Amino acid sequence: MDKLMIQGGLPLEGTVQISGAKNSAVALIPAAILADSTVTIDNVPAISDVDLLAELLREIGGEVDLAEREIKINPEKMFAMPLPNGRVKKLRASYYLMGAMLGKFKKAVIGLPGGCNLGPRPIDQHIKGFEALGAKVTNEQGAIYLRADELVGAKIYLDVVSVGATINIMLAAVRAKGQTIIENAAKEPEIIDVATLLTNMGARIKGAGTNVIRIDGVDSLKGCRHSIIPDRIEAGTYMILAAAMGQRVTVDNIIPYHVESLIAKLREMNVSVDVRDDQVEISGIADKVGVDIKTLVYPGFPTDLQQPFTSLLTQAAGTSLVTDTIYNARFKHIDELRRMGANVKVEGRSAIINGKTELQGAKVKASDLRAGAALVVAGLMADGITELTGLEHVDRGYEDLEAKLLGLGAKIWREKMTNEEMDQVKN
C-alpha cells in the first residue's frame, strides 16, 4: 500500500488537462451489454473503477479490450452469469449492471454494490422502476435477483431525484415493449451522455437532461463509437486547487456550462475566473472571503465538490456554512481537517468553517473519494508535509493525480507504507 506525500505552500501555475467523466464511464461501460455488436468508447479515464468494470464484463463472457483512452466491448458472447460477490462489492456503480443485464437477458443476479461509504444510499427507486417494467425483484443472501418474462413500458415517477435510478431505468427500458416515461428524472450531464450512447446504438430516447424522459422500446441495439464528456467533478477539483494555490492555472478540456455553480461561488469568494470556450483560467492569489453553499441536484452545487470546497473555505476570511442535502455522511473529512488545524465543526447536515486558519501538514486518511480530494487540497495549502493514506479511494476517480499536480509545480510523491503504518490504517 502507498501513501501520498504532499509538500504544502508551493504556488501552482500552468495548464491541466481534464479526463473523461468517471460518472459517465461507469454507466456507459455497462450500457454496452445492451448492444448486439462491438461498442467502442473513447476518452475513457484511466481509473480503478473502469478496470473493475472491464473485469466484470469479462466475467459474464464479454470480450473487452482496454487500451489508453479507449475501451472496446464485444457483447456477443455475454450471458446472464450471476455476480453475487467479488468485484461487484468494490464498486458502487456496479448497480448499473442490474438495468443493463435485465434489459438484455431479462434476468440478473447482482451483489449489493460497494464503493464509498457515504451513509444510506438506498436503491429503492431503481427497484421501483424495474418492478414497474414487469420485473420481479428479490433480495436473497445479500444479492439482488431480477427476473422478468418480458419488460413492458410504464410511467414511472421517481420519489427522489436520483441519477443512478434514472440511468438504470433507462438501461432496462430501451429494449422493453412500448413506451416508458420517467418523471422527476435527474438532469445531470452524465445522463445526457448515456442517452447519447444509447441513441447512437439505436435506442429511441427523448427528453434526456429534462425532468421527463420518454423511451420507446426497440427490439435490438447495435454497436457504435462514442466519446465520453469531460469530467466536471475532476474539472471542479482542479479549479478549487487553482483557487487555493494558483498564480495562474488553466483548466483545459472542460464544458464550462457544467461547472457554472462552482464558477459563481469562486467569484463570490473573490477568486478571478476567466471563462473561455473549453477552458477556464483561475488566479487565486487575492484575499478570499467566506461564502455559504448548499449542495443540490444538478444544476445546483455538486455534492461531489462539497468536500474539496470545504478545504478551500478554511483559507477564506469570516464564517462559511456548508450544507449537504444529498448525503448525510459526507463530512468525514472534517476530523482530518481539524487534525491539520482547521476551525470547523459539524452540526447536523452542515459544517461551519471559521477562517482564515493556518493549516499544518499532518498524517491524514481519506475515508472516501472526494474526502481524499479535500485532503489533497488541504495538503497543498498547509505548512510542511502531509501524509495521505486511503489512496485506493482517490485512485477510483482521479486519473494521474500526481502527474497532473507535478505539471502545475506541486511537490507530491508516493511512498510505500511500512507494515506498522498499514496496521495503524487498518485499525
Image (spheres, grey):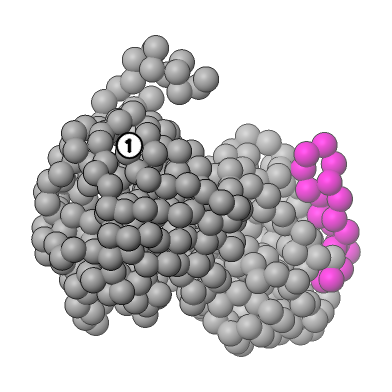
- Asked if residue 272 is among those painted magenta in the image, a careful observer would answer no
Does residue 53 appear in this view? no
- Percent coordinates x, y for residue 255 in the rendering: 33, 76
Q: Which residues are magenta?
A: 132-150
Quarter of the figure with residue 216: bottom right
Q: Could you tell me which residue is drawn at 55 percent across and 82 percent down?
A: 209
Determine the residue positioned at 25% across, 36% down. 360
**x and y percent of residue 52 in the render?**
51, 43
Mark 1 belongs to which amino acid? Met
- Identify residue for label 1: 340
Residue placed most toward the observer, 285 or 233: 285
- Give the vertical position of 288 relative to 342 (above or below): below
Task: Please check the rendered image and state whether residue 147 is part of the magenta-colored stretch, yes or no.
Answer: yes
- The image quarter containing residue 394 is top left
Asked whether 299 or 211 is in front, the reply is 299
Query: Where residue 65 appears, x then y in whole percent?
Result: 43, 50
Query: Residue at position x 18%, y 63% from top?
Result: 287
Vertical relation: 126 (above or below) 387: below
In the drawing, does residue 137 fall left or right of residue 306? right
| Front-most of residues 296 and 235 | 296
